[in-house]
Amino acid sequence: MSKVLVIGEHDGHKLSQATARCVTCASQIPGAEITIAVFAADPTAVAAQAAALAGVSHVVTVSGAHHAHPMGAVLAPHVVSLAKGYTHVFGASTTFGKDLMPRVAALLDVPQISDAMSVEGAYTFKRPIYAGNAIVTLEAPADKILVATVRTASFEPAAAGGSAAITAATVTVESPTHTRFVSVQAASSDRPDLTSAAKVVSGGRALGSKENFELIFKIAEKLGGAVGASRAAVDAGYAPNELQVGQTGKIIAPQLYMAVGISGAIQHLTGIKDAKTIVAINKDGEAPIFEVADFGLVGDLFEIPPQLEAALSK
Amino acid sequence: MQKILVGIKRVVDYNVRVRVKPDGSGVVTDGVKMSVNPFDEIALEEALRIRERGEPVEIVAVSIGPDEAQQQLRTALAMGADRAILIKTDQMIEPLAAAKLMLEIIKKENPELVIVGKQAIDDDSAQTGPMIAALWGRPQATFCSKLDLKGNTAVILREVDAGLETIEIDLPAVISADLRLNEPRYVKLPDIMKAKKKPLEVIDVASLGVNTTPGFKTLLTEPPKPRAKGVMVKDVAELVDALKKKGLVS
């Protein structure tokens, strides 16, 4: 039987939706028994949310002041000490998971599957390579713990309705002190989160200025959606780094993705391919973004965004 | 600081549209332009800037790959690395094996910093940096977008999902370079000529005594499922109507 340990991701108060998506991935492993691990200064609230996810059998909490700001280098030995007895250890393909999981895998001396996008068997998974231009099916050895990061855009979040038992675990490994948290400068939280929003409006460099990019924020507000950006727009300083969508930014799967002034380099397209409906607005009718768009509109980027904002106001 | 190791991976060039072989055995790499992984160029550029700020540091570029990876190491030498090491193998090397091979070089060279790209744009694994740090038992600063050296420590700005995180690490350490750490320089012709004279050591992978057998079996390589063809609309009104019909806007 497969026993899957999912590393819970959270901000100290709220369990990330990315973890609920990992649970769905884990639940597709035949006969999987799923445990979520919550490392936190005070895991109470997050553990309760984890226990309420359908399909979760156990929640294991590990509390300690050094888990207040989890960092891969500090957390990895703790995860390793919990991992014994499990067949799989999963984390999300977020910056948190990408920092932590390879360190866990190396300490366990096992290879890792990054960005698992479908479950083909207990030890067989598909994952994208070359910015999603190819998909490989990988078979892992069944006699070792399988460490994987889960491509969250490929899985719906697990539903509520679970009532898993919560147990506190004591981990007696020493925490490395060579890596110290200083601070985090987080984006304003009054807007929907980019990775979990149902609607996302993204802007590219073709918008021409930071001022014009403001229209993307206004359109997103009208839609009740999150804002994204192409790499070029972030490099140009129109949007902060955490809004970047694509191969090296965030991979998202909203119901509606609206790309405004984004030409659609393959590195960007890989981040949006799982969106249910894609709208492309661009001045260049030949732009590759139109190859993946469900609805395309060619026009001036100084005229269309204000019109769109006005049309959505009605 | 005396020494920085930089990882340099030979990958299919950023601008190549990669195609899957019809028999599902892999992607087409014959006759395709190969380059230095763009994130590794950023890693090297950061090492060069540390030296240019006055640290008398030796910069060693290390690659793992076939004989042809010497081309990418020559590029690294032309950018400004002092010498290069190729761990020669024709086999596919998974990140865990790459990290173990790098660790063998680290043991010989004793660097204070190892800088690698945050991911390679071929397999997109993003594992090698943290795996090197884990095996070495040292700190890792992944997704680094700013690096300040302060004696035996470094203050790192990291690009994380929430925004920007600052951490402090003790040296020696592993850094993985993110996009906005710097903008790599262009190589000039005289530097390419000079690079030909710089030392490039080729080490046979077998001599390092590391098990490089892949852990995974690749059963199939296939193209992604294409999206259905969409429609063009003539104006904003038509677009908003279409979205209303789908229930996406109210």
Image: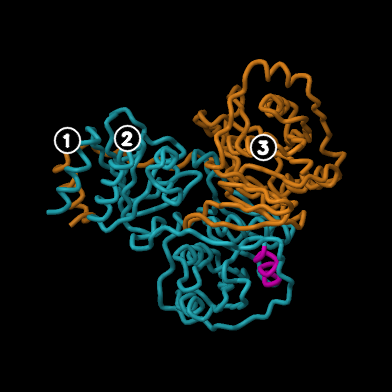
Chain colours: A cyan, B orange
- The quadrant in which the N terminus of chain A is found is bottom right
A290 is within the stretch colored magenta? no
Question: Vertically, is A144 above or below B74?
Answer: below
Q: Which residue is most to the left? A: A314
Subunit of mark 2?
Answer: A
Residue that mark 1 sits on: B234
The part of the chain drawn in magenta is: A74-84
Judged by depth in the image, the label closer to the viewer, 1 or 2, is 2
**What residue does disc 3 label?**
B53
Residue B118 % position (x, y): 60, 45
- Measured from the top left, where is residue B98 in percent x and y? 73, 44
Of A83 and A302, which appears nearest the observer? A302
Q: Is residue A4 visible?
A: yes
Instruction: Check disc 1 and report its element: helix, strand or loop.
Output: loop
Q: Residue at x 74, y 41 (%)?
A: B4
Question: Which mark is first along the chain, 1 or 3?
Answer: 3
Amino acid type, mark 2: Gly
Query: Where residue A269 sits in the image (x, y, percent)?
Result: 41, 41
Judged from the image, the secondary structure of the residue bearing numbered disc 3 is loop
Q: Which mark is residue A119?
A: none
Q: Is residue B169 above or below residue B42?
A: below
To which residue does mark 2 refer? A208
Tell me which chain the residue with mark 3 is part of: B
Pair 3/2: label in front: 3
Q: Are marks 3 and 1 on the same chain?
A: yes
Question: Are dots 3 and 2 on a single chain?
Answer: no
